[in-house]
């Protein structure tokens, strides 16, 4: 067992091995305690905590608050570049929803915007015990670093995770149903040559909305006219719309899988002298402020992004409190009819 040592006599940098020696346990046991693992006996846990306190071992915020094993800090990780984050109203709604729920708790939110994680900078920080849990939003198949975050702290995903596991917790909207209902509405209005500008197929939301579009066409006995990826951005929507026009394919309607992409597409159509809705009908997706800032105002699928953020926060708070929330929370979309059809 450790002996009584005053902090005034300690060296500047106490090692984990010194803590293990003082507590009479292995290095791995100290590591498990520091990282919040429950696979430690009560006696070893108490010995390590006492050694940490007496040796003043402070590797990170988790070690400084081992009495409660909480930092009361949460991370929102967005694997996108800053232009995308600040340019898409979806993220503002998600952050507002999370903050609204956390405002009724003791937790604060840290934001990490990283399209990748060179040198594991973000990952190392989050795995160091500096936060109690994390939200991950807008992730792609290439964002493998988030798996290392999820292995270290409780995580709630905004949207179906790329690598869906039974143990994962996520809050999503029914993107398949939303894509299908948007396309069905165009079919019901008599349109038969319906093209789409999709989100990226590296993201579950892009995949699911495209699946919904295809399911609606198949149900109506219609063929796909054109499918172009617009990357969920206005510039991407512009480029995708240009590619469809340049292909010469005939179409009478478009399902565009985000309002931002629809804004880009409308600009291209306007320059080409194609009128909406007189020549081409459009249904978007999101019902973000973009939908009512363009001309004509967009008919679109509303997704409750604010509520999604609130639900994500509620799920993570439940996990941290030792409760057992459901793994999957699915929110409905709603068709909002305006002037573009």
Image (tube, rainbow, N blue to C red):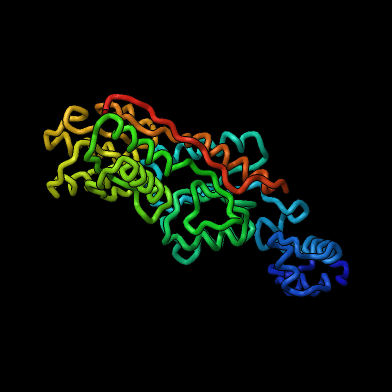
Q: Position of residue 202 (x, y in %)?
A: 38, 56
Left or right: where 58 falls relative to 55? left
Q: Residue at x 51, y 51 (%)?
A: 136
* Along the viewing direction, whichever of 4 and 273 lies nearer the viewer: 273
* Along the viewing direction, whichever of 320 and 162 lies nearer the viewer: 162
Above or below residue 118? Residue 235 is above
Q: Residue furthest top?
A: 338
* Along the viewing direction, whichever of 148 and 16 lies nearer the viewer: 148
Q: Position of residue 141 (x, y in %)?
A: 42, 59
Q: Residue at x 80, y 75 (%)?
A: 21
Left or right: where 200 falls relative to 109? left
Q: Position of residue 287 (x, y in %)?
A: 39, 32
Q: Residue at x 15, y 46 (%)?
A: 249
Q: Position of residue 110 (x, y in %)?
A: 55, 47
Above or below residue 229? Residue 281 is above
The answer to which image quadrant residue 297 occupies is: top left
The answer to which image quadrant residue 92 occupies is: top left
């Amino acid at each position: 067992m450790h002996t009584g040592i005053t902090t005034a006599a300690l060296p500047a940098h106490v090692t984990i091995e010194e803590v293990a020696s003082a507590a009479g346990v292995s290095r791995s046991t100290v590591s498990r305690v520091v990282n919040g693992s429950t696979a430690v006996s009560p006696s070893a846990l108490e010995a390590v905590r006492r050694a940490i306190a007496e040796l003043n071992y402070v590797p990170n915020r988790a070690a400084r608050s081992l009495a409660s094993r909480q930092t009361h800090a949460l991370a929102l990780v967005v694997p996108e570049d800053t232009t995308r984050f600040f340019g898409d109203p979806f993220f503002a709604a998600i952050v507002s929803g999370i903050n609204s729920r956390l405002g009724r708790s003791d937790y604060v939110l840290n934001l990490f915007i990283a399209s990748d994680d060179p040198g594991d900078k973000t990952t190392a920080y989050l795995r160091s015990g500096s936060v109690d849990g994390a939200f991950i939003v807008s992730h792609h198949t290439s964002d493998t670093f988030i798996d290392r975050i999820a292995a270290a702290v409780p995580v709630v995903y905004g949207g179906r995770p790329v690598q869906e596991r039974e143990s994962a917790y996520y809050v999503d909207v029914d993107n398949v149903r939303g894509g299908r209902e948007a396309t069905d509405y165009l079919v019901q209005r008599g349109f038969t040559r319906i093209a789409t500008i999709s989100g990226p197929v590296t993201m579950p939301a892009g995949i699911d909305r495209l699946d919904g579009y295809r399911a609606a066409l198949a149900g109506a006995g219609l063929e796909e006219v054109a499918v172009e990826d617009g990357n969920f951005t206005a510039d991407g929507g512009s480029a995708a719309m240009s590619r469809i026009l340049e292909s010469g394919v005939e179409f009478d309607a478009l399902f565009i899988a985000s309002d931002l992409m629809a804004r880009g597409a409308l600009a291209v159509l306007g320059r080409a002298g194609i009128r909406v809705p007189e020549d081409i009908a459009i249904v978007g997706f999101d019902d973000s402020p973009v939908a009512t800032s363009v001309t004509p105002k967009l008919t679109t699928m509303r997704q409750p992004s604010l509520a999604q953020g609130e639900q994500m926060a509620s799920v993570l708070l439940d996990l941290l409190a030792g409760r057992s929330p459901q793994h999957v929370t699915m929110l409905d979309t709603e068709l909002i009819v305006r002037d573009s059809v």
